Amino acid sequence: MKHALVTGAGSGIGAAIVRTLLDQGYRVSLLGRRLDALAATVAEYPQGHYCATCDVTDPAQVSDAFNAATEALGPIDILVNCAGAAPTSAFHKMPAAQWQQVIDVNLNGVYHCCAQVVGDMRNRGWGRIINIASTASLKGYAYVSAYCAAKHGVLGLTRALALELAQQGVTVNAICPGYTDTDIIRTAVAGIVNKTGRSEAEALRTFTDTNPQGRLIEPGEVADSVLWLCTDSARSITGQALSISGGETG
């Protein structure tokens, strides 16, 4: 079975992707900042995985982690770029350092990871690169301008790289979830409650009201889309932005 490497694998969407792939028999390498979180993600799986800490903004760490994953589980057939960060700030109050950090994690991190696998995928004539890009790659959201800029960049990179690799047996796609039921959203809801005194249900509607279906996306929905893109049935799907948003974006 093929070897998939997933960044941001310790929680939320990344963890759901890891478990879905392991359930289908894929060998999976997990990268993230905290080894304990990665271990918890695969606690129920006795084998078929490899965990390593890695800061995707650091090219040296990325290189070391990818080399170790390849040594542990073989050549990387599938790359899922899921590491990300989305701090909120009004643009006129945003420190330059925050802007740079968001770009480094969400856009440069994708570049560093793609650079580790593209050459080998080209040589072997098969590969899948799947970038978790968010609906923020398709539209703007207030107070996350850096995140929107980075995710728009990820989508541009996805489309350009897909064209370069179209005849090499390698597909490159972006999955663009809307607000998803993860710890990040739950923390944001708690923050709204604390700051405004609104009820939890009212605070949650800040996020669910953007979805025409009136709900949060489930991490498993994103993971199932990743699974499909990994298959040969999706070999003609490349350079695409798959919106998983209940109709929020087209």
Image (cartoon, rainbow, N blue to C red):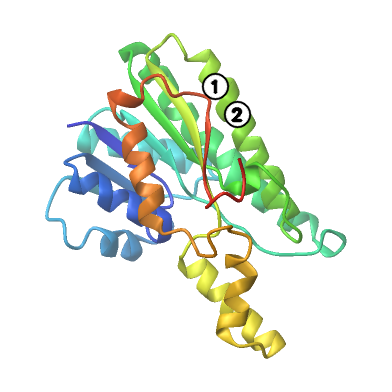
Residue in front for this viewpoint, 32 or 78:
78
Residue 60: x and y in percent read: 48, 39
The C terminus appears in which quarter of the rendering?
A: top right
Lateral position of residue 185 relative to residue 219, left or right: right
Badge 2 density bin: few <14, some 14–19, many ≥20, Cα 10 Å: some
Lateral position of residue 26 relative to residue 104, left or right: left
Write the residue at 54% across / 21% down: 161
Residue 53: x and y in percent read: 38, 53
Write the residue at 68% across / 91% down: 197
Task: State the residue position of label 2.
Answer: 157
Q: Residue furthest top?
A: 167
Write the residue at 55% across / 59% down: 179
Is 238 placed above or below 101 here? above
Residue in front for this viewpoint, 227 or 69:
227
Q: Secondary structure at mark 1?
A: helix
Is 201 placed above or below 160 here? below
Whether pointer 1 and pointer 2 mark residues with C-beta atoms closer than 8 Å, the reply is yes
